[in-house]
Image: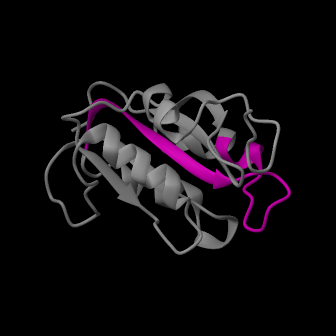
C-alpha cells in the first residue's frame, strides 16, 4: 500500500524529484534563500543525488545550477534572480522554489513570468516539488559572463 502525505502526488518521492530536476552526482549546486520553512526532505534528496553538500552564496566559483527559495515577502524578484546569476555558468539553470498558490508567501505566477525576462532568463518548466513548494526552471543565456 502506498500513501503520500498530503495526497494527490504522482511523484515517487524526493529522490526521483532530484532526478527530474536534472541533478546528478558531481554537479555544483548553489542554494540561496534557505530558511526554516524550506523542505528538508527535498534538500536531503538533492544532496544525496549530488553525493555532496550544496554550496551557499559565499562559494565564489561557478556553479551548474542555483536553487533559489523565494517567498513573496523576500523583496524584488528581479533583483533576487539577477543576484542568483552571479556564480551561474553560462547556459546553467535556476530552479526557483516558491510556496504553492494559497500557501503563506506564495508568489503570483505572473510575477515570475514578468521577472524572468527582465533578469535575462527564459522560463521553461514549472513542477510541484513537495506538498508546500513549486519549482520553476529558468535558463540563463549561454553567453553569461
Q: Is residue 89 magenta?
A: yes
Q: Which residues are magenta?
A: 88-112
Residue 67 appears at what percent x and percent y? Answer: 43, 49
Residue at figure coordinates x 46%, y 36% from the top left: 15
Residue 46 appears at what percent x and percent y? Answer: 39, 44
> How many numbered marks does the figure carry?
0
Q: Is residue 107 above or below residue 123?
A: below
Q: Is residue 81 visible?
A: no
Q: Is residue 7 above or below residue 20?
A: below
Answer left or right for 48 relative to 79.
left
Residue at figure coordinates x 64%, y 64% from the top left: 71
Residue at figure coordinates x 40%, y 27% from the top left: 22
Q: Residue furthest left?
A: 61
Q: Is residue 100 visible?
A: yes
Q: Tell me the quarter of the image containing the N terminus.
A: top right
Q: Tell me the quarter of the image containing the C terminus.
A: top left
Q: Quadrant of residue 116?
A: top right
Residue 82 appears at what percent x and percent y? Answer: 42, 52
Amino acid at each position: 500500500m502506498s500513501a503520500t502525505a498530503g495526497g494527490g502526488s504522482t511523484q515517487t518521492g524526493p529522490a526521483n524529484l532530484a532526478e527530474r530536476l536534472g541533478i546528478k552526482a558531481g554537479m555544483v549546486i548553489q542554494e540561496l534563500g534557505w530558511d526554516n520553512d524550506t523542505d528538508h526532505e527535498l534538500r536531503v534528496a538533492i544532496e544525496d543525488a549530488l553525493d555532496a553538500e550544496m554550496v551557499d552564496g559565499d562559494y565564489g566559483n561557478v556553479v551548474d545550477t542555483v536553487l533559489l527559495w523565494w517567498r513573496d515577502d523576500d523583496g524584488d524578484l528581479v533583483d533576487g534572480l539577477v543576484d542568483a546569476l552571479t556564480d551561474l555558468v553560462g547556459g546553467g539553470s535556476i530552479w526557483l522554489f516558491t510556496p504553492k498558490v494559497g500557501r503563506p508567501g506564495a508568489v503570483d505566477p505572473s510575477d515570475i513570468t514578468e521577472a524572468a525576462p527582465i533578469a535575462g532568463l527564459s522560463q521553461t518548466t514549472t513542477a510541484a516539488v513537495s506538498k508546500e513548494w513549486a519549482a520553476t526552471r529558468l535558463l540563463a543565456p549561454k553567453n553569461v559572463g
